[in-house]
Image (cartoon, grey):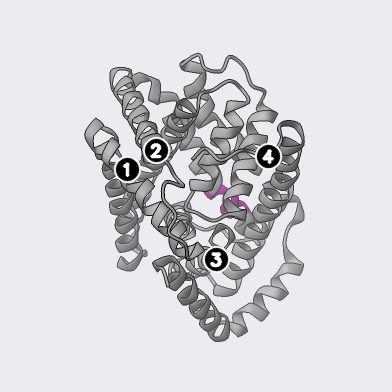
Amino acid sequence: MSFRTWASVLTIILLGLIIFLARGEIVHAWELLGKVNLWILALLIPLQFATYFAAGEMMFSYLRQKKLITHISPLSQARMALEMNFVNHALPSGGVSGISYMSWRLSKLQVAPSKATVAQLVRYVAGFASFIVLLLISMAIITIDGDINRFIVLFGGLIMVVMLVGTFLLLVLVSSKKRSEAFGRVVAHVVNRIISFLTFKKKQGVVKSDTIAGFFIEMHDEYLILRREPKILIKPFLWGLVFNALDATLFFITFLAFGVVVNPAIILIAYGLASLAGAVIVTPGGTGAYEAIMVSFISSAGVSAGVVIAAVLVTRIIILMGTIGFGYIFYQLALLKYGKPKSQA
């Protein structure tokens, strides 16, 4: 089995263990649901829309500056972000399926595939960079707070290292034309080997090496342009700050609805850890691992486990209902309008 499959199996086992050990707290959490302030909880609906708008603006602010898109309404922006998130939840692949879908979706707005992919690269880099900034602020806050244990500080530092290394490796790849071309050919070779293994047939050239290599070379060319125009990344970065802050605030609002104020820095670190796990686990949106990590982490900060379980589960249910429910509807409307996306390979 692959690493991700093993990780998913381990997650299910750990989740079952957590449920067994916390069964008393789960009963308590169920009792707390009757005491939640629905008026405060209702704030999650407009806040979730604002979150998806900010997610889209990380891409579209870049595309507008490059004059690749002149105008797109806030509703369309949030809608496309919801579609992409739905695809990522329906086909968990660490974001790859969402990138492929959004490239096809942007092509309907006359944006070339390479430009669309670079826009999403900008989105991920801006998201990582802005989260690191927020994480640094959170680390400073919890370090000053003498009541926070070292376990939390350790994991906060771990997230920062992982994100910095990931961003660095991505930049190293696209900064060299030779590395970009070589990586593209390796990707084509690996994908063809996987296809051969899964179909039990020796298939050659299902994914064209020259096509994939050319695609990564185009990304390298776009990277060189970005290096000459670094100011163009300022707006995506600022929108990244808004997106990450709003996404973490969803949990803060739910805790308020349960009558509990949790340190936003703790929520942000737990959100970062859970998001990293969600990119690895093959369940939709990392379901299972995401909730287990957030519950364990926030509970370790001294918050009642029953309250944490109730608040995290309620937030996740509302988020997933919005993402999968509305995302599915918008996704189907896009397919009806444009037809099914064709393979880019």
Residue 212 marker: 2
Residue of label 3: 291
Measured in 3D between alpha carbons, the distance from the residue under mark 2 to the one under mark 4, in whole angstroms, is 22 Å
| Residue 54 visible, this angle | no
Disc 1 vs disc 3: which is toward the camera? 1
Do the residues under discs 2 and 4 have CB atoms within 8 angstroms? no
Which residue type does callout 3 highlight?
A: Glu
On the image, the x and y values in percent for residue 1 come to: 42, 73
Which residue type does callout 1 highlight?
A: Arg
| Magenta-colored segment: predominant secondary structure | helix
Which residue type does callout 4 highlight?
A: Lys
Q: Earlier in the sequence, mark 3 or mark 2?
A: 2
Q: Is residue 250 magenta?
A: yes
Measured in 3D between alpha carbons, the distance from the residue under mark 1 to the one under mark 2, in whole angstroms, is 7 Å
Residue of label 4: 340
Q: Earlier in the sequence, mark 4 or mark 3?
A: 3
Q: Secondary structure at mark 4?
A: loop
Measured in 3D between alpha carbons, the distance from the residue under mark 3 to the one under mark 2, in whole angstroms, is 36 Å
Say if 173 sits above or below 57 in the image.
below
Q: Nearer the viewer, residue 172 or 51?
A: 172
Say if 100 sits above or below 317 in the image.
above
Measured in 3D between alpha carbons, the distance from the residue under mark 4 to the one under mark 3, in whole angstroms, is 33 Å
Do the residues under discs 1 and 2 have CB atoms within 8 angstroms? yes
**Residue drawn where x is 44% and y is 66% of the image:** 4
Extent of the magenta region: 248-253
Q: Earlier in the sequence, mark 1 or mark 3?
A: 1
Q: Earlier in the sequence, mark 4 or mark 1?
A: 1
Residue of label 1: 185
Disc 4 vs disc 1: which is toward the camera? 1
